[in-house]
Image (spheres, rainbow, N blue to C red):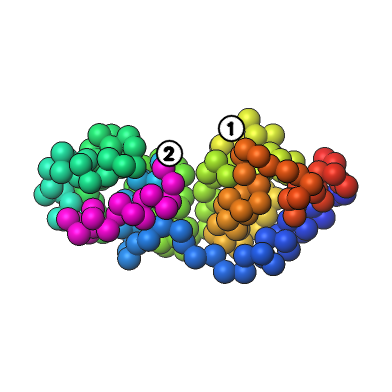
């Protein structure tokens, strides 16, 4: 099976299963999305969505958040894990947004990645989901599935991102990365995965080995 046929099959299957791709993290604007994505590092979206209402009740914009004590932020977000580091990052990026970006989340990778606690993956999510800029954020689900499907060697997240961007047209990146995440959670988990029952692995790996 040619790689283009494999990609077409994967794209069609994902589009059939997930024609709509709501953003998993609850937010109301680029700032609350940025904070939610930062909190989601090594934490489930479900848990983040339980924590952010209390956090955003305290402060839901960079001006208010920059005025809060780190300890107060940390106490609220503790269930998300890595709370000391994340609390400092949330306060620090809020101060940076106020001081350097007129109180608005910047819409550039360079500016976002210069902020504390914001790596390339977090910046990619914000750029794609808040600003509609084509990006392909690679989380653990996407990294795992790209390797299982023979679309990347899986040696690094960076390589996986490059490979997926090469395989799929830029016009579908923003939606596709969510579709793959949803698929990974429902059909292709890290543990207890049965390739024979997986709508994609059962076809791509068994009938058409890479």
Q: Is residue 177 magenta?
A: no
In the drawing, what numbered circle is on residue 106? none
Q: Give the range drawn in magenta.
A: 42-61
Instruction: For mark 2, give the secondary structure.
Output: loop
Residue at (67%, 55%) from the top-left corner? Answer: 168
Q: Can residue 148 be seen in this view?
A: yes
Crowd around label 2: few <14 · some 14–19 · many ≥20 (10 Å): few
Residue drawn at (18%, 56%), measured in percent from left and top?
Answer: 59
In this rendering, the count of numbered labels is 2
Of the two numbered discs 1 and 2 on the same chain, state the one appearing first in sequence.
Answer: 2
Mark 1, residue position: 156
Residue, disc 2: 42
In percent of width and height, residue 74 lies at 22, 40
Mark 1 vs mark 2, foreground winner is 2
Can residue 102 be seen here? The reply is no
**C-alpha distance separating marks 1 and 2:** 17 Å
Dividing the image into 4 quarters, which one contains the C terminus? top right
The local secondary structure at tag 1 comes to loop
**Residue at the front extreme, as displayed:** 192
The crowding category of the residue bearing disc 1, from other C-alpha atoms within 10 Å (few below 14, some 14 to 19, many at least 20), is few
Front position in the image: 43 or 113: 43
Residue at 35% across, 62% down = 27
Q: Please state the horizontal and vertical placement of residue 36, each as a whole percent of the image.
A: 35, 52
Name the foreground residue: 16 vs 105.
16
């Amino acid at each position: 099976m040619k790689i283009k046929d494999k990609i077409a099959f994967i794209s069609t299957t994902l589009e059939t299963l997930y024609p709509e791709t709501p953003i998993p993290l609850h937010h109301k604007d680029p700032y609350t999305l940025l904070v939610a994505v930062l909190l989601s590092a090594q934490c489930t979206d479900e848990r983040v969505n339980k924590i952010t209402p209390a956090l955003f009740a305290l402060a839901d914009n960079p001006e208010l958040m920059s005025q809060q004590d780190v300890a107060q932020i940390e106490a609220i977000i503790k269930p998300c894990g890595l709370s000391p580091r994340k609390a400092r990052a949330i306060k620090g990026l809020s101060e940076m947004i106020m001081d350097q970006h007129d109180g608005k989340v910047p819409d550039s990778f360079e500016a976002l990645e210069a902020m504390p606690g914001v790596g390339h993956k977090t910046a990619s999510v914000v750029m794609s989901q808040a600003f509609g800029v084509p990006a392909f954020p690679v989380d653990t689900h996407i990294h795992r599935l790209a390797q299982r499907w023979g679309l990347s060697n899986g040696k690094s997240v960076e390589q996986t991102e490059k490979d997926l961007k090469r395989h799929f047209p830029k016009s579908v990146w923003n939606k596709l990365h969510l579709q793959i995440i949803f698929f990974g959670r429902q059909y292709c988990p890290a543990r207890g995965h049965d390739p024979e029952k997986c709508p994609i692995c059962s076809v791509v790996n068994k009938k058409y080995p890479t």
